[in-house]
Amino acid sequence: MTLATFFVRPGRSGAAALVLALSAAAAFGQKQTPPAPGAPKDFSIPTPTKFTLDNGMKVTLVPYGTIPKVTVDLAVLGGSANEGANEVWLGELMGNWMREGTATQTASQISQSAARMGGSLDVSVGPNSARITADSLSDFGPEMVRLVADVAEHPSFPESELERLKADQVRQLSIAKSRPQQIALERFRSLMYPNHAYGRVFPTPEMIQGFTAAQVRAFYDANVGAARAHLYVAGRFDPAAMEAAVRDAFGGWKAGTPVSFAPPSPRTARAIHLIDRPGAVQSTIVIGMPVIDPTNPDYVPLLVTNTLLGGYFSSRITSNIREAKGYTYSPFSQVSVRSRDAY
């Protein structure tokens, strides 16, 4: 369950860099044995407050930290996994369009409001969920909750911005399709998840250009609603004032449609696939396999194992492939958020 990206850069500059690195190593001499780690500090997890609104939205409030900041994270189960075969990146287009204003605020006013509160607000759409994430100074926590609710519940979807957003996606597609890492990832996903949204990484330019306002709004109506949502608030805040703000801001949100998700059936057969790119100066190698999902008791041990294997700079993969052998600049491994997927 590892991914390694091998960059080969022949030429004088690479050789010079190698000579300099060797000279520096010789100057400093042999590495000393690092000191033994100290005893781990005690860590107490704060007790969260959890409740569910009448419309089905779940809420978790976590008092945490000493810095006077608040993070507000609204997660809605309705991401790109619910896109049809002709709707690749439709969820992303919806998320980008939601940032363009609400029934009462323009995109500029939303940004200014977040900045005035000492924070920011963003909308993103991933494989399994759409998220509205924001942060602010503690004094503005309840107000930031109301801003997040406005963006989630009342997007105006101004049609004047749609063509610009689609043009941006076409440019992003062109850039992504020119990169070997993305080309390899597209093949990897399509082979692991045949006939499933997880396996559809890129649309065509024609698909993007054909998206309509009605199509985006229909995707929003089908995938964004209170019954699919979970609001997380963490940081320094007044619990009573925060709960009152949440109930007031989200209590009238429509429940929406129930969660629906077609579970994937990832392929497990061992196979090797090659993509020939004549003249390419880099090679990308992706190795992946299905793994357990977060409901499994061994999921957290899996994350810890992955961290040691290739999840951070001093991991085993980096130490071996990059530092010891010098094969590549940035090898890594990860456990992805897609159901039963690691690479």
Image: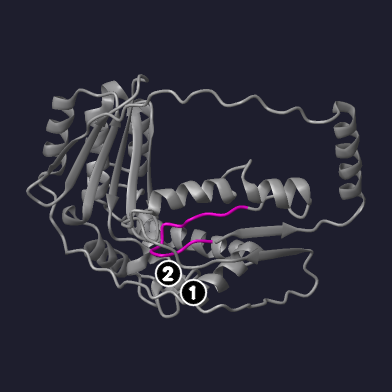
The relative height of residue 308 versus residue 204 in the rendered view (above or below) is: above
Amino acid bearing label 2: Tyr
Residue 58 x, y percent position in the rendering? 18, 46
Residue 233 x, y percent position in the rendering? 27, 35
Distance from the alpha carbon under mark 1 to that under mark 2:
9 Å
Q: Residues within 10 Å of mark 1 (few under 14, many from 20)?
A: many
Amino acid bearing label 1: Met
**Residue toward you, 8 or 270:** 270
Could you tell me which residue is drawn at 18 percent across and 29 percent down? Answer: 242
Horizontal side of residue 152 vs 240, given as left or right: right
Could you tell me which residue is drawn at 52 percent across and 72 percent down? Answer: 205
Q: Which residues are magenta?
A: 332-343
- Point out the image quarter for the C terminus: bottom right
Q: Is residue 173 visible?
A: yes
Q: Magenta residues: mostly which secondary structure?
A: loop
- Which residue has dot 1 on it? 192
Could you tell me which residue is drawn at 65 percent across and 51 percent down? Answer: 317
The relative height of residue 238 versus residue 284 in the rendered view (above or below) is: above
- Which residue has dot 2 on it? 198
Asked whether disc 1 touches disc 2, contact meaning CB atoms under 8 Å apart, the reply is: yes
